[in-house]
Image (spheres, rainbow, N blue to C red):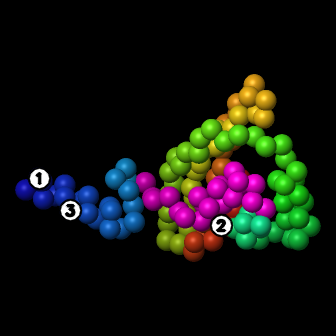
Amino acid sequence: MLVGYAMSAFAAGVIGGGSLTGRPAEPVETRAYLDALVDRDVTRLAQLQPPADLGTQAGQLQQADGASPWRTKALTYLGGATLGPVGVYLYVLDVMSPDGTSEQTVPFTFTVVEKKIVRVQ
């Protein structure tokens, strides 16, 4: 009986789009955004980033394109929470300076509504 209960809980989590840890599965949109950021792909970033006025968006893209190339060491999905169509997801990006002397950890928080990124912090 206990085995049946455990199996049904496992199946419900996996089929429901969650994960074995009980936290929401990582959204494709947020991973694509961070991959574009790491790859310094300004075209893809422009397509994925939240709506902003044209001047702000152009400034952010120019800054990303001209930034010094920090090397990515690790990208970690910490988890998130959903309520209906709204989700908040947390990531940490570990990067190394171009000369290899400095390491930084950069947190990212994404707010996603109906599979569209509406805010990045």
Q: Quadrant of residue 24?
A: bottom left
Instruction: Please name the amino acid that badge 1 sits on.
Output: Leu
Cα separation between marks 3 and 1: 10 Å
Separation of residues labelled 3 and 2 (CA atoms): 32 Å
The image quarter containing residue 60 is bottom right
- Residue situated furthest left in the rendering: 1
What residue does disc 3 label? 8
Secondary structure category for the residue under label 2: strand
Helix, strand or loop at disc 1?
A: helix
Q: Residue at 53% across / 63% down in the picture?
A: 27
Q: Which of 83 and 23 is in front in this view?
A: 23
Q: Is mark 3 on a helix, strand or loop?
A: helix
Query: What residue lies at 43% left-to-right and 54% top-to-bottom?
Result: 23
Give the residue at mark 1: 2
Residue 111 part of the magenta-drawn span:
no
Q: Nearer the viewer, mark 2 or mark 1?
A: 2
Residue that appears at 55% across and 45% down = 76
Label whose residue precedes the other's in the sequence (3 or 1): 1
Q: Does the magenta stretch include residue 26?
A: yes
Q: Give the range drawn in magenta.
A: 23-42
Name the residue rendered at 59%, 45% in the picture: 75
Q: Please name the amino acid that badge 2 sits on.
A: Ile
Look at label 3 and name its amino acid.
Ser
> Dot 2, crowdedness within 10 Å: few (<14), some or many (≥20)?
many
Q: How crowded is mark 3: few (under 14 residues within 10 Å), some or many (20 or more)?
A: few
Measuring from the top left, give residue 115's x and y in whole percent: 57, 72
Where 92 falls versus 110 (above or below)? above
Q: The N terminus lies in which quarter of the figure?
A: bottom left
For the view shown, which residue lies furthest in the top direction?
101
Of the numbered discs 3 and 2, the one sitting upstream in the chain is 3
Please state the horizontal and vertical placement of residue 102, each as a whole percent of the image: 74, 27
